Image: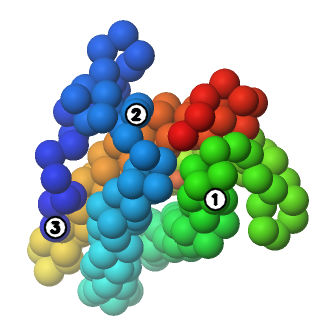
């Protein structure tokens, strides 16, 4: 399951060397930007998480009785990642992104619908979660990297690891768009330095 679109090259882009995609999203309407993130990255992430959950469950079943540590630990670690990531996507779609759409319409900062918190507070929390989720992907990959699975489970675990790596790359690009372009634009609007 490849990630949608050719976006890998954009990972690692910076202010001095922006990609064409970065340049586009630095000025495109914010509502269009959040729609893009949801339709491309959130949609792909949910598909990948669902497939990964099925694969790790299959591996766990096949390795039952042979491996009492590595695969169960990987399954538990992936479970934490999936729960956090599902919650993160929902938090953006039900809270942060509607707030951004309202700001774009109003042309200024507006309080959130739930707790009246500033946009910056919410965005800082979401950015912190990006780092935690990248770490969970990396830890799960490392846990399985040296594991010699049985022949029966080998193909399943290989598919799991390949897809997890692809999800990690997509997550890096997804986080880059939010942390380095979308959220700074919202903060600038909140502080009155930009208009949408
Ligand atoms: Fe997102
Ligand atoms: Fe996010």
Q: Specify the farthest residue to the right.
A: 116
The kind of secondary structure element at disc 1 is: helix
How far apart are the two marked residues, 2 and 3, measured between alpha carbons? 31 Å
Q: Which quadrant of the figure has residue 27?
A: top left
Q: Which residue is mark 1?
A: 102
Which residue: 75% across, 30% down? Answer: 191
Quadrant location, the N terminus: bottom left
Q: Which sits in the foreground, 141 or 184?
A: 184
Q: Which sits in the foreground, 30 or 168?
A: 30
Which residue: 63% across, 59% down? Answer: 102
Q: Which residue is mark 3?
A: 1
Query: x%, y% of residue 33?
Result: 41, 50
Q: If you read the primary sequence from the N terminus, does the residue marked by circle 3 or circle 1 appear first?
A: 3
Q: Which sits in the foreground, 117 or 68?
A: 117
Q: Which sits in the foreground, 53 or 25?
A: 25
Which residue: 47% across, 34% down? Answer: 181
| Above-or-below relation of 143 to 54 | above
């Amino acid at each position: 399951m490849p990630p949608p679109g050719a976006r890998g090259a954009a990972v690692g882009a910076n202010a001095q060397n922006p990609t064409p995609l970065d340049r586009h999203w630095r000025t495109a309407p914010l509502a269009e930007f959040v729609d893009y993130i949801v339709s491309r990255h959130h949609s792909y992430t949910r598909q990948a998480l669902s497939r990964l959950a099925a694969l790790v469950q299959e591996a766990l079943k096949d390795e039952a009785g042979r491996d009492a540590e590595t695969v169960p630990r990987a399954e538990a670690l992936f479970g934490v990642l999936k729960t956090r990531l599902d919650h993160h996507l929902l938090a953006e779609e039900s809270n942060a992104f509607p707030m951004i759409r309202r700001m774009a319409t109003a042309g200024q900062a507006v309080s959130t619908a739930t707790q009246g918190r500033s946009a910056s507070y919410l965005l800082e929390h979401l950015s912190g979660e990006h780092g935690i989720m990248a770490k969970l992907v990396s830890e799960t990959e490392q846990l399985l990297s040296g594991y010699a699975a049985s022949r029966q489970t080998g193909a399943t675990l290989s598919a799991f690891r390949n897809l997890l790596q692809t999800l990690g790359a997509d997550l890096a690009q997804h986080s880059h768009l939010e942390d380095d372009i979308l959220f700074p634009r919202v903060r600038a609007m909140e502080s009155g330095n930009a208009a949408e």
